[in-house]
Image (cartoon, rainbow, N blue to C red):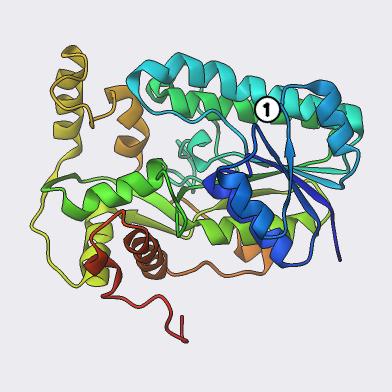
């Protein structure tokens, strides 16, 4: 079955992979970019049609959406520095509201909202206590984690999607965990975190969920070919940073000496850094922005993601190896780090 897709945020890491994967599968794909050039050039070379326009321009969006069957909304304001918090919280949900209201006006048959696993908090009681899954409650302003602007912005954007659903928009939602993989040019938060663990001598002793960007793209493509309405949490594995570091050592063929800092120590150091306005270490995020990582202890359950779609997750080791190999080929890390584990092996 062929479907016509319009992808917002298609010049970004996740959106770009979604657009290229769909085009490679033979689906007509359009992406909206703010301007020509940059990431739009590579998309055009992959068979993706690039439309230059503004996502908040209602007339433009309604016209563009009238030409397609599936909207994939992956656009958001992304910034994680201390000064950008208010802008992120304001702009990301406003962008979702504008795009999804245009989809309602256009009568879009299926909208797929790319959210995040970060919107969910672990179950507080019952047989799933400590587990985060697709049925988990969302964080609220009463929770300490709400002090993380990124988390708050994604919850507010998710609420905009729910409102659009309630108003009659045929919606599916995808909630990826930390997303890594090749072609992460910036890199984003997840890729930057992985890179930081390569050489860090002091590492927080915390846990997080991880997935491959190509798995997210495969999931979206499978969802686009299904009736709308599903909700999918895409997480391949829930891993301690100790395990992540061991994987990095295995993939790179080296052994890095590290000290793993207890959660309380990490929290205390972040608070001291906050009092100094971030001047002690600009790389350390505000204490509130660490709340999600510091509070994650149980499983982040991705069974509602690829397994529910009849697909398999890529092994975490392969995702790490492919990420490092791409960064090495593009001069972002020492070239030797991308050669110890060959991503081109036939059995991969």
**Residue 181 in sight:** yes
Mark 1 surroundings: few (<14), some (14-19) or many (≥20) residues within 10 A: many
**As drawn, 161 above or below 42:** above
Q: Residue at x 52, y 56 (%)?
A: 213
**As drawn, 102 above or below 219:** above
Viewed as shown, does residue 320 lie left or right of 102? left
Q: How many marks?
A: 1
Q: Residue at x 71, y 23 (%)?
A: 97
Query: Residue 191: x, y in percent?
Result: 37, 49
Q: Which of the two residues, 222 or 138, is positioned nearer the viewer here?
A: 222
Question: Where on the picture, by quarter, is residue 35?
Answer: top right
Query: Residue 172: x, y in percent?
Result: 73, 44
Query: Residue 272: x, y in percent?
Result: 14, 19
Question: Where on the picture, by quarter, is residue 333?
Answer: bottom left
Q: Quarter of the image containing the N terminus?
A: bottom right
Viewed as shown, does residue 119 lie left or right of 328? right
Q: Which of the two residues, 100 or 79, is positioned nearer the viewer here?
A: 79
Query: Residue 41: x, y in percent?
Result: 62, 49
Q: Which of the two residues, 243 or 220, is positioned nearer the viewer here?
A: 220
The residue indicated by pointer 1 is 96
- Give the residue furthest to the front: 37
**Residue 166 in sight:** no
**As drawn, 319 above or below 233:** below
Q: Residue at x 40, y 66 (%)?
A: 322
Q: Residue at x 21, y 14 (%)?
A: 277
- Give the residue furthest to the bottom: 346
Secondary element under disc 1, as helix, strand or loop, is: helix
């Amino acid at each position: 079955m062929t479907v016509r897709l319009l992808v917002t945020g298609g010049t970004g890491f996740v959106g770009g992979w979604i657009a290229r994967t769909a085009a490679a599968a033979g689906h007509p794909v359009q992406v909206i970019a703010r301007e020509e050039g940059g990431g739009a050039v590579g998309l055009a070379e992959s068979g993706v049609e690039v439309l230059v326009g503004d996502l908040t321009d209602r007339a433009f969006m309604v016209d563009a959406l009238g030409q397609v069957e599936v909207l994939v909304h992956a656009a958001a304001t992304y910034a994680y520095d201390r000064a950008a918090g208010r802008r992120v919280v304001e702009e990301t949900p406003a962008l979702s509201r504008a795009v999804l209201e245009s989809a309602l006006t256009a009568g879009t048959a299926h909208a797929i909202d790319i959210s995040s696993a970060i919107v969910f908090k672990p179950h507080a009681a019952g047989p799933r206590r400590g587990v985060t899954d697709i049925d988990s409650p969302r964080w609220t302003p009463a929770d300490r984690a709400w002090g993380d602007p990124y988390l708050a912005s994604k919850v507010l954007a998710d609420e905009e999607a729910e409102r659009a659903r309630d108003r009659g928009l045929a919606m599916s939602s995808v909630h990826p965990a930390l997303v890594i993989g090749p072609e992460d040019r910036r890199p984003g938060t997840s890729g930057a975190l992985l890179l930081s663990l390569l050489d860090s001598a002091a590492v927080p002793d915390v846990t997080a969920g991880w997935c491959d960007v190509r798995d997210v793209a495969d999931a979206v493509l499978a969802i686009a070919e299904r009736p709308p309405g599903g909700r999918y949490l895409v997480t391949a594995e829930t891993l301690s940073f100790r395990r992540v570091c061991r994987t990095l050592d295995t993939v790179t063929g080296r052994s890095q000496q590290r000290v793993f800092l207890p959660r309380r120590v990490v929290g205390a150091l972040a608070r001291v850094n906050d009092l100094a306005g971030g001047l002690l270490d600009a790389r350390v995020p505000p204490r509130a922005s660490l709340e999600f990582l510091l509070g994650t202890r149980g499983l982040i359950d991705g069974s509602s993601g690829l397994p529910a779609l009849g697909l398999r997750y890529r092994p975490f080791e392969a995702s790490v190896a492919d990420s490092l190999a791409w960064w090495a080929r593009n001069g972002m890390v020492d070239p030797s780090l991308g050669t110890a584990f060959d991503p081109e092996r036939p059995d991969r």
